[in-house]
Image (cartoon, grey):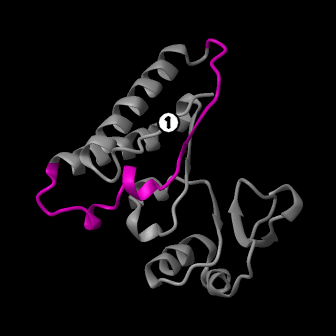
Amino acid sequence: MGLIQLPEISNSQASIFITEIYMSCLLNISKASFGNDSKRVLVAVEEAHTIMPESATMGVSDFASKGLVAKIAQIALQGRKYNVGLLVLAQRTANVSKTVLTQCNSIVSFACYDDTSISFLKNVFGSSSAEMVPNLKKLQAVVFGKIVKSERPVVVEIPFDQNKA
């Protein structure tokens, strides 16, 4: 297990560049060892909009960052073949690369209210399930994909013990 934190560099070309280098190296190592009892790797990206932003939310002339984000998206597209998984955590899907989001095989959504996120979730969950999302209570989520054994999205309640928090 490893942890890379970039507290000094947030939402910048530098953080995107560092992430791209890290993920490229990880993918190259996984490709080289694939089939030789290779280990599964999960890369968790919190505040994903800072690392893999949707190009519409980036500066118009920020071509370098757009290229780096495109490369990260390609790694997301290819990673599963080589046992590299990606866990994307974000508060607003509108600000995260759609190429990356469409590679997610499971989606967990807590309450959200913006039209762009709801529109994205309609494509994933279907209209009726996505319309439940703004009405979810605290610690409830709509879940769909390989993470659940269901053909349809399900509403779950996340167990929480106040005494252990």
Q: Residue at x 33, y 45 (%)?
A: 9
State the residue lying farthest toward the top.
36
Name the spot of residue 142 as percent of width and height, x first.
Answer: 70, 72
Q: Which residues are magenta?
A: 36-63
Q: Which amino acid type is marked by label 1?
A: Gly
Q: In the rendered view, does 155 fall on the left or right side of 97?
A: right
State the residue lying farthest toward the left.
61
Camera sees residue 45: yes
Q: Nearer the viewer, residue 160 or 20?
A: 160
Residue 55 in the image: above or below residue 114: above
Magenta stretch: residue 52 in it? yes
Q: In the rendered view, does 40 fall on the left or right side of 149?
A: left
Name the spot of residue 83 as percent of width and height, x first.
Answer: 59, 31
Q: In the rendered view, does 144 fall on the left or right side of 21?
A: right
Residue 76 in the image: above or below residue 148: above
Camera sees residue 52: no
